[in-house]
Image (tube, rainbow, N blue to C red):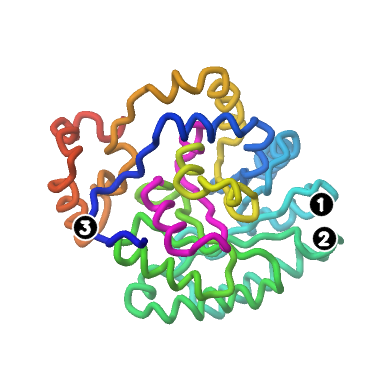
Amino acid sequence: MKKSAGTETPLVTFPIDEMQKLIESFTPDRLASFLDATYLQENKQKSEILKMVDLAKSLKCASVCVNPIAGINILPQALKSSGIKECYVIDFPFGESDIEKKAIEAERIIKKSRSLRGEDKGNIELDMVINIGRFKEDPQYTIHEINAVCDAADNEEVKVIIRSSELTVQELYKICEIFAMSKATFIKSSTGKDTYGALPEHISIMREVIGNNHGIKAAGGISDAMTAMRLFYAGAKDEKLQKPNLFRIGTSSPLNIITSMSWLLEAPEVHLKTSIIPCKICPFFYNRKQEAQLREEAYNRCEECKHNHYLKNKSLWYNK
């Protein structure tokens, strides 16, 4: 049953027994197959992109995600015959270009990558950023925006970055419904440059709305295995959903995630018994940089939340 947006206390709970079973079903190698190794730094150094490519190859990640300005001249040859996909962001990070420009960029990337890589279809993914402002004014615009990029992508994978930290709960439900009606196959939480990144509550809502036939990519602030496992629990708890075509983790720290997965597997029960400060994984905690409407919603939720006693010294540990 779909929970009522705006009434329940947030936070996905993590039963120790279920989490331990989930963790123990993974190996570092298996977890690596869900990772989109990401390099989206502004300096766009070729040497740094190639380092991420080499790391992704050694770990056998799902893809390498870069900005096409520099990456389109690097990834096709660097990843040829590797089985690892090229992933390019479209209109990153704000998504404010018009529909035609996004579609032209998608078509350009596809054509150039295929020409340089010289392999069949199925090796390219596009992570497009929607125009949040236009969505808030006219949700139907977003359907046309997504479908235009999908058409230009010529059957290559399109992931839709919805920037969930910039949405109210009601808007998050609405954008997920719109995504489910579009031609895209993946919905993605964040650019990694938004107010906050992937949090279990939002990933859970995404899965609730879009169902089990579309993929979810959790991205933003994911740098260790336990964080990744909580997001798996929120968005791919069912074993049938634990496939790279239905769930991904976007991260600029793939090696740290894989290394920490080895540590986690050594004593999962010890890690799981370490208490979580609920506010640190709650979207309503991260409100200082948000616009007024979102801050008001966050304050109201915090006042009603059973965990609000943690906020007594919020200013002391907000950024810790």
Residue at left offset 27%, top offset 38%: 279
Q: Nearer the viewer, residue 195 or 31?
A: 31
Q: Secondary structure at mark 2?
A: helix
Q: Callout 1, which amino acid? A: Gln
Mark 1, residue position:
77
Is 283 situated above or below 280?
Answer: below
Who is closer to the viewer here, 287 or 98? 287
Q: CA distance from mark 2 to mark 3?
A: 52 Å
Contact flag, marks 3 and 1 (Cβ < 8 Å): no
Q: Quadrant of the C terminus?
A: top left
In terms of sequence position, does the residue under pointer 2 or pointer 3 come before the other? 3
Indicate which disc, 3 or 1, sits on the residue closer to the N terminus: 3
Residue 163 coordinates in the image, percent (x, y): 41, 58
Does residue 188 show up?
yes
Q: Where is mark 3, residue-wise?
A: 7
Q: Quadrant of residue 260?
A: top right
141 left or right of 244? left
